[in-house]
Amino acid sequence: ETVLPLAPGDFVLVGHSLAPIQRDLLAYAWRLGGAGALILALGLVGGAWLTSRALRPLDRMGTAAAEFAAGDMSRRVPLVGAAAELQSLADVLNSTFERLARSFAQQARFTADAAHELRTPVAVVLTQAQNGLESSDLAPDARAAFAACQRSDRKSTRLNSSHITI
């Protein structure tokens, strides 16, 4: 409403209803809120998709590393078409996996060779210990030493038969 003075003592009161304007503003506010919610939802879905796509190569690297750690020495990181930084990281991991696999193979060969080389002298010592224990004129200290050799042999046999791996 507004008041317009005319002559002294006379005025005109002019008014207009604000209900249509308020209704239009409320409708505009709802449209603006709906558009904002739609943009937010699209941003969240798009962000989740982009994030999962960006992290997929790292997930593949983690899976390959876990499988390698679990004993699959042939496992490597498969990255094709990844960003240069990720490809570089995958190359480093793959070369590390390769060196570790070679080291484990060398360790297994060394252990097998050492066990093979020790069998003959240990067999001789054990035979002598058994022959010594069968002797009737053996000193108590020597008998205790030969018995300790046999106990160690039995313990070693039990450990070997349980297939302990490091």
Image (cartoon, rainbow, N blue to C red):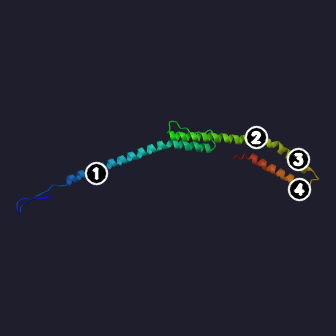
Q: The residue under label 4 is which amino acid type?
A: Asp
Relative image position of residue 61 (x, y in whole percent): 55, 42
The residue wearing badge 2 is 113
* Between discs 1 and 4, the one toward the N terminus: 1
CA gap, disc 1 to disc 4? 102 Å
Determine whether label 3 and label 4 are within 8 Å by CB: no
Determine whether label 2 and label 4 are within 8 Å by CB: no
Left or right, 166 with reference to 24:
right
Is label 2 in a helix, a strand or a loop? helix
* Between discs 2 and 1, the one toward the N terminus: 1
Is label 4 in a helix, a strand or a loop? helix
Relative image position of residue 105 (x, y in whole percent): 69, 40
Relative image position of residue 133 (x, y in whole percent): 89, 51
Which residue sits furthest top?
A: 80
CA gap, disc 2 to disc 4? 34 Å
The residue wearing badge 1 is 29
The residue wearing badge 3 is 128
Which is in the foreground here, disc 2 or disc 3? 2
